[in-house]
Amino acid sequence: MAERVSSVSATTTVPRSLFIEENYTIVKKLGKGQFGEVKEVLKTGTQQRFAWKQVTSEQDPYYEVEAQILRDLHHDGIVSIVEAYSQDGVVDMVLELCQKSLQFDMDSRLEPAPMTGKKQYMRPRSCDIASTMEQLLAAVYFLHENGVSHRDIKPDNVLMSVGGTWKLADFGLATRFNRGSYMTGEVGTQPFMAPEVEQRHYTEKCDIYSMGVLFIALTIGKQWWRPESLEDDEAKEQAKQILTLKTWKEQELSAGALEFAKRMVSSESERGSAEDALKNPWLQKLSSQADGVVDMVLELCQKSLQFDMDSRLEPAPMTGKKQYMRPRSCDIASTMEQLLAAVYFLHENGVSHRDIKPDNVLMSASGTWKLADFGLATRFNRGSYMTGEVGTQPFMAPEVEQRHYTEKCDIYSMGVLFIALATGKQWWRPESLEDKEAQEKARQLLTLRTWKDLELGHGALEFAKRMVSLESERGSAEDALKNPWLVQKVSSQAGCCAIS
Ligand SMILES: Nc1ncnc2c1ncn2[C@@H]1O[C@H](COP(=O)(O)OP(=O)(O)O)[C@@H](O)[C@H]1O
Ligand SMILES: [Mg+2]
């Protein structure tokens, strides 16, 4: 990744608008905030992707501060800046590309309960919450040590890096402070804003308050408001109830976690610093449990195939209904070829992955797809069977459920992955479904009619069907690699890309 961070105030005469145009290609929009837009961009002549944030200064005299602070502060828990350029009241920042926001992650944890259908918050494991908090508090500690207060910490402004760690982002309201004096700007986002910020007389501890509200949201799955800030008596009472031991016990949370939360959202004098929060006994105990895994330093990848597929769901122009923007056939074929080659190699070396799915396929820094997450992989002996019922539905081959299977289970997973990639729909084996209607839909998905409707060919359907067929008919990775549709599409890829 490029390291150059150009001076924020530009001295060159290149018109600002050309700075991005000459060096980057816009891939898609990532988000829109208060002060501008954020887009995913591709650095010209490379496969490196970045986020481009543009901020306009219209009302804000401090519009360059974000770029300056990011330029000066480098920390694992802070989104890094690659270059920045400022001219005529517009700042362009090229940032490390991140995956998803903590808000997005929390939203996707709201799932309908099995019986009632009521939305329920699927809390992360306590050790994962603790490790998220530790990562972010370490970043806050670093900021404060360097005389910077973020002032807008909230789940929207916490992003997951390609490496899967959480980072503080959006320094649009950040400022430098002097120890011993007070900040006075009433900035931030309710309900993450500390009470003393409203009084316009506060220190960097306002960030700890925000971390407290964030922690409560992450743990309980509910937005918490300071009772005193609420008008309505019932709402006040509910807010009080959220921070009681009774509620936390009901949710199978410990008194230690509640104490941790309460200290961060207490009045400024009792709140403690980032360092104090980091030393909290509950946090230390739980986050060390999360460390109980093998630490591996892995090649840093860009994004998962799942993430790529999710971002291909776009509202249709007229209806607004979400539509899947399928990659070009030649690209799908080339993705499949890359992955099947990896599977072939694994199998040749006596290893079965056993958990192939779009979440476990990552794009390398150079833009190729790689198999990742070997957490369920195992060595096998040719001629004998594996018996562990492991994997992820619906990518798990039927014979795995029978606890008697070979490495061909990986080909089944590749088949389900291919169907998802080609049709944009999750396919379940009809026999695995209870509901008659769902069964019928699953059958329909693998018919020529559907594939024609989706402008997919007969050859692609045959390729899919073979991989998800019964083990005896499925073929090996080598067979799949020799599939005529795949071979033809891959060989057409060179020409296909030259046009784009
Ligand atoms: N580096 C990044 N990588 C990926 N997405 C980003 C990045 N920076 C911002 N975004 C997306 O854009 C949104 C708005 O960006 P943010 O920096 O928070 O700007 P604002 O000040 O407008 O809120 C974020 O919530 C996130 O979804
Ligand atoms: Mg933001």
Image (tube, rainbow, N blue to C red):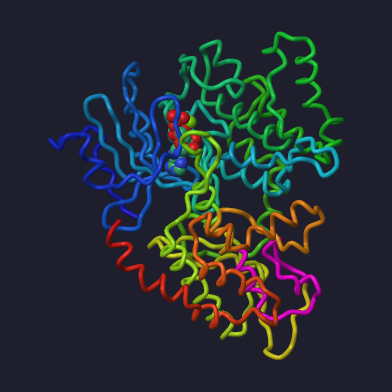
Q: Relative to residue 363, is residue 244 drawn left or right?
A: right
Where is residue 124? Give x, y as percent: 70, 46
The foreground one among 234 and 194 is 234
The total of numbered circles placed on residues is 0
Q: Residue at x 37, y 74 (%)?
A: 491
Where is residue 109? Give x, y as percent: 68, 42
Residue 238 visible, this orientation = yes
Where is residue 296, by image quadrant? bottom right
When the figure is inspected, residue 325 is found, relative to residue 416, above or below; the finding is: above
When the figure is inspected, residue 430 is found, relative to residue 475, above or below; the finding is: above
The foreground one among 95 and 424 is 424
Query: Of all residues shown, which one is farthest toward the front?
Result: 449
Q: Relative to residue 322, is residue 27 drawn left or right?
A: left
Quarter of the image that includes the N terminus: bottom left
Q: Residue at x 41, y 74 (%)?
A: 488
Query: Of all residues shown, which one is farthest toward the bottom?
Result: 383
- Write down which quadrant ligand 1 falls in: top left
Residue 143 visible, this orientation = no
The foreground one among 194 and 329 is 329
Q: Relative to residue 253, is residue 495 drawn left or right?
A: left
Q: Residue 318 lies in magenta, yes or no?
A: no
Where is residue 348? Give x, y as percent: 56, 86
Q: Which residues are magenta?
A: 389-416
Quarter of the image that includes the C terminus: bottom left
Where is residue 362? Give x, y as percent: 51, 61
Where is residue 234, by image quadrant? top right
Q: Residue at x 55, y 12 (%)?
A: 198
When the figure is inspected, residue 56 is found, relative to residue 104, above or below; the finding is: above
